[in-house]
Image (cartoon, rainbow, N blue to C red):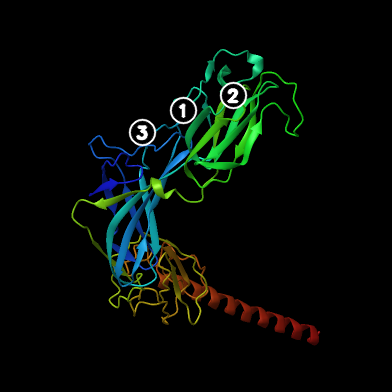
Amino acid sequence: MVDYACTGGVALNNSTVNLRTKVSIPTTLTVGQPLSIGWKLGYKQDPARFGSPDYFAPGGKVLVTGNVQISGSWVGVLQPKGSLDQDNQLQPGSILRLPEGISDAAHTANAGTLKVSPRKLFVDFIPPAGEVMVNDDDPRVQYETGYWEDLNDQPLNNNDYHHDIRRTVDGGATASLQFTGTGIEYVAQRDYRAGKVKFYIDGQPATPASVDASKLPNGTPSNDANKGGLTLWRFLGLNYGKHLIQVVNDEAGKWAQLDAFRVITRELQHPPNEYRATCSLVSAPVSVDVTISEAGGSQSPDPTGTGTGSPSPTLSPTVTPTTPTATPTNTHTGTSTPTHTGTTTPPVSGVNSTTTSTPKPTLTVTATVTPTRPTPTAPQVIITPSGGAQTGEAPQGGSGLGLLGAGTVMVTGSALGGVALMRRRAAHARGQRDS
């Protein structure tokens, strides 16, 4: 928690606005992770608040900028920023709402240790671009000299702003307005009974210096009567800030009228300096050490074949016996993708190994394998004798010697029968020759 005292700018009337903030800074990072600084902002319980410095249409913006010093492995400054639009119309002293928080981040490219130190905050107000009407009866309009008649409830077809107007026939009668913006327009009636009025900006003759409300824009006399709500004169291009306009009746006996002023503010590229409040630390200075380490490297092999990263596998072997070959291999497929052949060498994480074993049928096992080789629970595969059916199981009933004896008898009987048949055929052949 970091407390600030803010003065100047939108801390109005030489008051001090106190803020209570919460700064968030990470203390450990790896290279490539952003160093992110966040501030949560809030007013303290005392009544002082930032206030609007003038009249503004909706759309003004409060901008808060932090300042964070970085020292150590590298030196620099972070400037967390945040803003909040003021969506209501403002008048002098209206409380300005603060953004909930501000943030900024820096890329970390190298390992090292940094010291992060929050410093000052700056609170700015950016006026909205646009136009604000100031009616002739607004208290900001001052009727300094002469008599100005207040004419209310004018006919609707006159088109006067707020259906009222001020009028004087006194030569030299003056009305003025202090405004904040970058331009000003004079709104009044065009009437053949009116005359010339002169304008001064900040005490100096304006350009153009005057307008004749009895004439058309091309300079020809007008036959209009009570045609109100017209912009008869404007002055643009002022530097943003406070200015004074004065309207003076230049022809005694003729009407000089005032319906309204239109205050114009163009879009500003930068917050006005006069609205900036500076916030200094009230609590003790704060610094946070941040350690940035290299990103994690590859793991070293586990020569013992034991590991703790995975649970013991559950084996579900699929046995596919085939005719034995001279160099059969057992292939295991698992999530750690080691290939185990034989039983002489334990597996090494990340490495495939192959050894040669005695001839066996090809055994294909699908399993989840960890560096610790489990004891298989699958049944042993019994090899049938050469020439037998490759069923993967031993024949049921009788012994192997019995089967071998029966086969020998059958072969011997077949041979003896063949010899007798050959002798009979030879005797028959001799009998035929003798006859």
Query: Nearest the camera: 62 or 434?
Result: 62
- Quadrant assignment for the C terminus: bottom right
Is 328 above or below relative to 235?
Answer: below
Amino acid type shown at disc 1: Gln
Q: Quadrant of residue 151?
A: top right
Measured as percent of width and height from the top left, residue 391 is found at 49, 65
Is 58 above or below relative to 69?
Answer: above
Frontmost of labels 2 and 3 is: 2
Residue 264: mark in rendering: none
Relative to 358, is 419 on the left or the right?
right
Q: Residue at x 27, y 37 (%)?
A: 48
- For mark 2, give the secondary structure: strand
Q: Which residue is mark 3?
A: 93
Frontmost of labels 1 and 3 is: 1
Q: Are marks 2 and 1 in contact (CB under 8 Å)?
A: no
Residue 257: mark in rendering: 2
Give the mark count: 3
Amino acid type shown at disc 2: Gln
Extreme residue toward the left, this view: 284
Relative to 387, is 93 on the left or the right?
left
Amino acid type shown at disc 3: Gly
Regarding residue 199, the answer to whether it shows in the image is yes
Query: Nearest the camera: 247 or 372?
Result: 247
Q: Which residue is mark 1?
A: 142
Regarding residue 57, the answer to whether it shows in the image is no
Q: Quadrant of residue 289?
A: bottom left
Q: State the separation of the CA atoms marked 1 and 3.
A: 21 Å
Measured as percent of width and height from the top left, residue 432 is found at 79, 83
Query: Nearest the camera: 306 or 275?
Result: 275
- For mark 3, give the secondary structure: loop
- For mark 1, give the secondary structure: strand
Q: State the separation of the CA atoms marked 2 and 3.
A: 31 Å
